[in-house]
Image: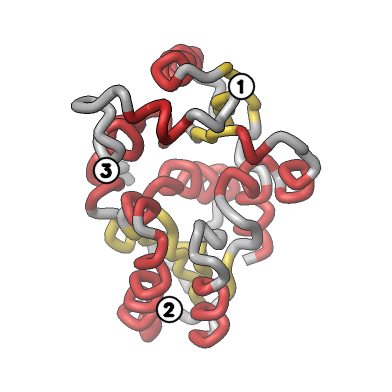
Amino acid sequence: MRLPSDSKLTEDGLAPAGQGKLLLIACGALAREILALIEANQWHHMALTCLPAILHNRPEAIPDAVEAAVEKHRKAFERIFVVYADCGTGGLLEARCKALGVEMVAGPHCYSFFEGNAAFAAHDDEITAFYLTDFLVRQFDAFVTKPLKFDKHPELKEMYFGHYTKLVYQAQTDDPALTVLAKKHAQTLGLEFERRFTGYGDLEVALASA
């Protein structure tokens, strides 16, 4: 299938695509990676729909949005699997999924499951690291610059990022152009730059188990 633009995935998400007995309800920021895994592993029993990625700027809205998607599509599929981690909901998404009788990806956020939850937890400097994935490198302005108003008030950068020491780019793909862009974002924020090639990490494991 032809994937919508990153901007559309950010604001609108993705209507159900593909056919199968299992529906994946995911964040729009994961659409490209999930579809790549479905194709590579020939998981023809899976279909995908995505909620707008920009919900991550309002994590308190994620549980209600996921519930609405589950109720909307439940009758058309035998099973539903939620491809969100906690994502800043403070455990509310997990509780909602349990109440709905659907499973979800394990982990505190996508940065953790991309690197692998165990490997991510072993780091001792993550509280001072600001993370970007492939999607967020491409959509930096939509998720960081404009919401935090750096384009109009660059002096706010110190207020928001003064306690960070580095920007960690978790690369799902080996794309030199994205690495250059990620370095530029680090410079914009005045942070050191670190690149970690994660591939799909525990995301592939979670989908395989689903």
What's the amino acid at mark 3? Pro
Q: Tell me if residue 176 comes above or below residue 63 in the rendering.
A: above
Q: Residue at x 59, y 48 (%)?
A: 41
Crowding at dot 1, Cα within 10 Å, few <14 / some 14-19 / many 20+, comes out as some
Q: Nearer the viewer, residue 204 or 181?
A: 181
Residue 175 in view? yes
Q: Residue at x 42, y 35 (%)?
A: 160
Label 2, on which residue?
A: 77
Foreground tag (2 vs 1): 1
Q: Do the numbered discs 2 and 1 sit on residues whose CB atoms are within 8 Å? A: no
**In what element is the residue under mark 1?**
strand
Identify the image quadrant of residue 143.
top left
Q: Are marks 1 and 3 in contact (CB under 8 Å)?
A: no
Instruction: Please determine whether, in this image, residue 118 is positioned above or below residue 89.
Output: above
Q: Amino acid at mark 2?
A: Phe
- Decide which of 48, 201 is in the foreground and name it: 201
Cα separation between marks 2 and 3: 23 Å
Sequence-first disc among 2 and 1: 2
Q: Tag 3: Cα neighbours inside 10 Å, few (<14), some, or many (≥20)? A: some
The local secondary structure at tag 2 comes to: loop
Counting every numbered tag in the picture gives: 3
Q: Image quarter for residue 125?
A: top right
The spot of residue 97 in percent (x, y) is 52, 78
Pointer 3: what residue?
Answer: 4
Residue 165 location, x and y as percent? 59, 25
In the picture of the structure, the residue carrying the numbered disc 1 is: 195
Q: Secondary structure at mark 3?
A: loop
Label 2: how many Cα within 10 Å (few below 14, some 14–19, many 20+): some
Left/right of residue 208 with respect to residue 37 in the rendered view: right
Q: Residue at x 32, y 63 (%)?
A: 16
